[in-house]
Amino acid sequence: MSSGTHTPARKAQANGRRIVVEKAFPAPSRLATPSDLTAQEAQGITEAINPLVADLFALYIKTKNYHWHLAGPHFRDYHLLFDEQADQIFDATDLLAERVRKVGGSTIRSIGHIGQLQTLADDNETFVPAQQMVRTLMQDNQSLAQAMRAAHEVCDRCRDYATASILETLIDEAERRKWFLFEVSQASV
């Protein structure tokens, strides 16, 4: 409804005729997901998780950037590795963003919002050597795992064991990506 109100129809009787009466209710002004967490706990979780969602989006774009702009003797192997890792990172964004909504918070709304919250640096260079790509992604995944550990502590304090559990899996995935990147960086030295 463009007027900002919700108007459910109500049936009534008037002089033996059936009529429909419109009763206007204000449109919901906020997203109110029910949760047994306190408002402070939900806010703490939201503030801990949203920067991770932003960093995951930033890392996804960086990984795809490197996937698209890769050159060199290890092209095929790195191209496939970066694509696989980007898919995994993208999937993680949805898991965490939906957790924020499930606990009653709101999450990322735009590219600008991502830019406000992200802690990982973008890479807008025209050309990045393959080995630098690998090192950068390795460092970013390490930073992401550290930030996830800090968010895990917040979730534990706020009794949000479901988000903490998801973070445990995502920490493992970030460490696995870092490990693969480390190993390919050693193979080409």
Image: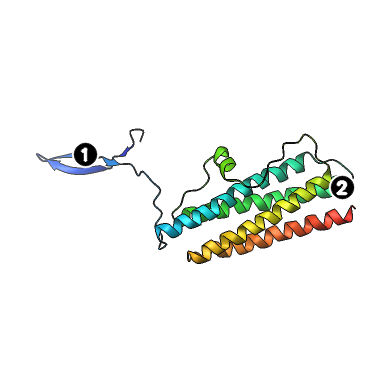
Q: Position of residue 159 (x, y in %)?
A: 48, 66
Q: CA distance from mark 2 to mark 1?
A: 70 Å
Q: Nearer the viewer, residue 174 or 153?
A: 153
First of labels 2, 1 by sequence position: 1
Instruction: Determine the residue positioned at 41% across, 54% down.
Output: 33
Q: Amino acid at mark 1?
A: Val
Q: Position of residue 103 (x, y in %)?
A: 46, 57
Q: Is residue 108 above or below residue 168?
A: above
Q: Secondary structure at mark 2?
A: loop
Q: Position of residue 169 (x, y in %)?
A: 63, 63
Q: Amino acid at mark 2?
A: His
The outermost residue toward the left is 15
What's the colour scheme? rainbow
The answer to whether 115 appears left or right of 39 in the picture is right
Q: Nearer the viewer, residue 186 or 68?
A: 186
Instruction: Determine the residue positioned at 62% across, 64% down.
Output: 168
Q: Which residue is mark 2?
A: 74
The answer to whether 183 appears left or right of 101 in the picture is right
How dense is the environment of label 2, judged by Cα within 10 Å: few (below 14), some, or many (20 and up)?
Answer: few
Instruction: Determine the residue positioned at 85% across, 45% down.
Output: 75
- Residue 20, numbered circle: 1
